[in-house]
Amino acid sequence: MQQRIGLTQFLVNEQHAGRITADLRLLLEITARAVRTIAAIVSKGALADALGEAGTENVQGEVQKKLDVTANEIMLQANEWGGHLAAMASEEMETIFPVPTDSQKGNFLLLFDPLDGSSNIDVNVTIGTIFSVLRNPRAHHETPAEADFLQPGHQQAAAGYAAYGPSTLLVLTVGNGVHGFTLLRETGEFIYTHPFMTIPEETREYAINASNARFWEEPVKRYIAELQQGKTGPRGSDFNMRWIASMVADVHRVLTRGGIFMYPIDEKCRDKGGKLRLMYEANPMSMLVEQAGGAATTGRGRILDIVPERLHQRVPVILGSRKEVERVTAYHGE
Ligand code: P6P
């Protein structure tokens, strides 16, 4: 069997092909090292005194788990000194984090949800880290401002996630397809195991939190009802449902075997604009899904075309197998 390559060789190949620059390669390699550190702590569970609540709330008003805070610090400390980026933003921080004044500023902005799905930590279900890379619009001597982050998702230079599950996976795109790497714990290397991940256009699997059904808008109620009617309804086929309540785990399943993932607007989250955050959940996942041949909309428009107004703004998310996303979106238009 042909010798598998590692993340570094993959990124060097991308750099030699002119698809990424040396500093973007450095950013991705440092981020990979950071998620490897997070994986090591997550895998210890109760043995690392890392479970439970931190006793604080984040900018979202959500109770922070100890691991939320720890993962955030790991991402900041790993990336603040390399000179490859100018500032960072995180679900766990209200304002942006410019790199320290004594560090050289670089060409990129890094956004992340350091530990997504943290409600699953204490019950040992897959959680993850989601990251998004934007280009720094300012000259290096200037201090970045929050407005510099408010770029539409189609301007992302890279996006990816780490999934801390039975194996630790790193899945990323730099705009040339979606590629997955599996952590070999013995050596700490991410091995290239999933080249050009592709989402089948059709699917028989959907993911939604069905407990919100009474709050959904009519197009979503119609779409889900048709799936539940299965062979006896207009779709003429039976469908299966999954809901892990960890976006990384649900989206990884969609990237691996197809499906449609939905967190639509509903009467419960309407005043917030949705449940999931645009900048460091919806945008990176939408870039990955589109790069894998899928589609990602709010139900009324392409997610990657949204011009952000606030760093922590929320949006409805409907993404996955192209034909299903197009059907749901069409229902919204009727
Ligand atoms: P609910 C996790 O808190 C998260 O942000 C996503 O990872 C996940 O898809 C969603 O929220 C789960 O939401 O309402 O089902 O708990």
Image (cartoon, rainbow, N blue to C red):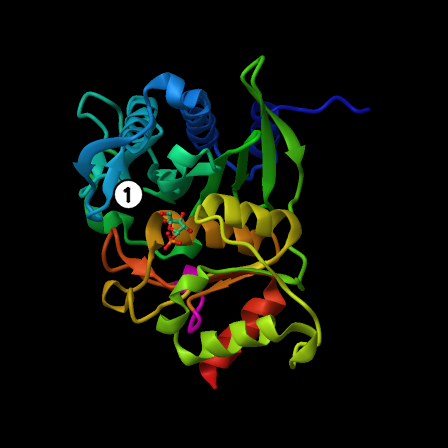
- Looking at the image, which is closer to me, 12 or 42? 42
Looking at the rendered structure, the number of numbered marks drawn on it comes to 1
* 71 on left or right of 200: left
Q: Position of residue 196 (x, y in %)?
A: 66, 44
| Mark 1 residue element | loop
Answer yes or no: is residue 142 visible: no
Whether 173 is drawn above or below 297: the answer is: above
Instruction: Indicate the amino acid at tag 1.
Output: Glu
Q: Residue 262 magenta-drawn?
A: no
Image spot of residue 55 (x, y percent) = 18, 33
Q: Magenta stretch?
A: 299-305
Of the pair 202 and 306, the residue shown nearer to us: 202
> Which residue is the extreme one toward the top?
186
Q: Is mark 1 within 8 Å of ligand 1?
A: no
Front-most of 121 and 115?
Answer: 121
Residue at 50% from the left image edge and 36% from the top image edge: 163
Near mark 1 (Cα within 10 A), the count class, few <14, some 14-19 or many ≥20, is many
Q: What residue is drawn where x is 21% and y is 35%? A: 97
Tell me the residue at 21%/39% (across/down): 93
Could you tell me which residue is drawn at 47 percent across and 27 percent down?
Answer: 32
Could one spot residue 8 in this view of the protein?
yes
Where is residue 206? Give x, y as percent. 56, 61
Q: Quadrant of residue 17?
A: top right
Tell me the residue that label 1 is attached to: 91
Q: Residue 107 falls in which quadrant of the image?
A: top left
